[in-house]
Image (cartoon, helix red, strand yellow):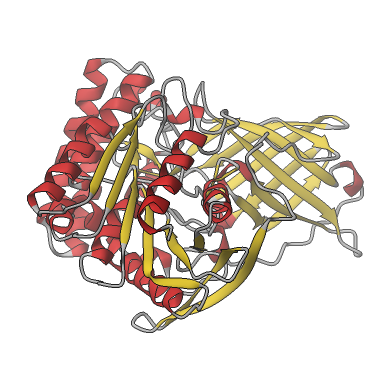
Amino acid sequence: MIPLRIPRSILPASLLILSGAVAAPALASPDLAAPAVPAASLIASSPAPASLPAAAEVVGSWEGALAVTADIQLRIVFQVTEAPDGSLQATMDSPDQAARGIPVASITYGHGHLVMEVTAVGGRYEGYLEAPDRLEGNWMQGGASFPLALSRVEKVSTPQRPQHPELPFPYRSEDVIYPNPEAGIRLAGTLTLPEGPGPFPAVTLVTGSGAQDRNSDIFGHRIFLVLADHLTRSGIAVLRSDDRGVGESEGDFRAATSADFANDTRAAVDYLLTRPEVDPSAIGIVGMSEGGLIAPMVAAGMEEVAFLVLLAGPGVTGEEILFRQGELIARSMGASAEDVERSRTLQARLFTILREEEDPAVRSHRVEAELRGAVEEMSDAEREAGGIPQAGEEGWIRAQLAPLEGPWFRYFLLHDPAPVLRRVQVPVLALNGSLDLQVDPAQNLPAIEAALREGGNPDFTVEELPGLNHLFQTAETGAPSEYGQIEETFSPLALDRISHWILDRFGG
């Protein structure tokens, strides 16, 4: 999803590994759905042995909830096992962030005191065995410390996701690998094909920002699995793929920009053209959030693309989106007008540096200096609200810098989708939820419509769907804190709107 800038109090700096919904921080605050290090790219460290005469005391599955705000909790799970030599080993999961099997580099236990170092995410857990099945402790990361109580469980809890399809499917499903010759990588995905000989209309799905797998797994919601299942049952072939550098796809996610992801999408369209089950005159792209920015980039220069579906796609620059996004989310969390203005002022100063400074090294140095100045100006209360320990600002600053130093953020900040949309001449369906606080429909839908109209596009539909949030869930407020709490993965109203629009034009 598009990066979400929110007040300093929303999330701890560089919180774990977030895939598409909540991610590493940037600017004065962490963001939801910014690019993050994919779990697939983590390099496992060999667990360090520990001499533990009472290892059985902590062997098992330990689950707890990390309170990142009053409204948002993330489930954390440690799987602790005993090796044949009596040493302990462990892995860490953050199920709500679709991050699993993160290696615990070292684990020590003695006299009821457990310490686990998770170097892959720069984190550490330290706790004490208060009862046979309960640990009381803290999770430390990015210079901040957060209470985390863990309970031993026989089975890790799973949220209710009633829309997730279950086998057997009434259609064919095939795992595929296809090349991106320009990038010199291979991409992996799943192709679902309706029953029958075809050829069928087809789409490739493009994820939002953040390292995401083919299912676009966010807070336990497998958004693209549900979308692909609905479309395939409706008679539309669907290719959904792991982002480059994620899952089974090759490449370096952290070095990529939206332009690189557009190149990957072209490779996906080329692959669909090779499949005899696919109608070559009816291949479209469904892009969600950042994917709604990428899809027009491909269609504007690739005549094989027959249509586009833009789900919460941007119509203005990333800079404009982030300003509005930060304001809307801050207000939803009860931030004062003064806090909103203070955050926007810092954003503006940082955006100016990112926009105007061409040299990456100089840019990074100037941004770091700006952040240090901001920390120095904070009162003790502001530091506490921002999760910045009195002696831990270095970790916080490094966490803020991380997403800003990569190429993706600057590209997104500067890219204006309007000129690209003016070049799109194929049918376009642009949908947005009325409660979307990340890509504001009032800001973006009119801009998309204006660009398509100015370009002379003969067939486009721009529609705001009432009561839906950024993930197209039926919501109460649209606040990101609701994403994981809502059982619905994708509004049936939105699913039907997408499939009917496609089939009305390309259903044969």
Pinpoint residue 280: horizontal percent, then vertical percent. Answer: 39, 73
Left or right of 425, for residue 434: right
Foreground residue among 213 and 206: 206
190 to 322, vertically: above or below: below
Foreground residue among 158 and 337: 158
Residue drawn at x 57%, y 28% as measured from the top left:
485
Q: Quadrant of residue 170?
A: bottom right
Foreground residue among 214 and 122: 214
Residue drawn at x 57%, y 33% as measured from the top left:
488
Residue drawn at x 24%, y 62% as measured from the top left:
297
Q: Residue furthest front?
A: 508
Q: Quadrant of the C terminus?
A: bottom left
Residue 406 shows in this picture = no
Pinpoint residue 481: horizontal percent, then vertical percent. Answer: 48, 28
Q: Quadrant of residue 10?
A: top left
Pinpoint residue 13: horizontal percent, then vertical percent. Answer: 43, 40
Count of numbered labels shown in the rendering: 0
Pinpoint residue 279: horizontal percent, then vertical percent. Answer: 43, 71
Left or right of 126, for residue 129: right
242 to 339, vertically: above or below: below
Residue drawn at x 13%, y 55% as measured from the top left:
422
Foreground residue among 31 and 45: 31
Residue 100 shows in this picture = yes
35 to 433, vertically: above or below: below
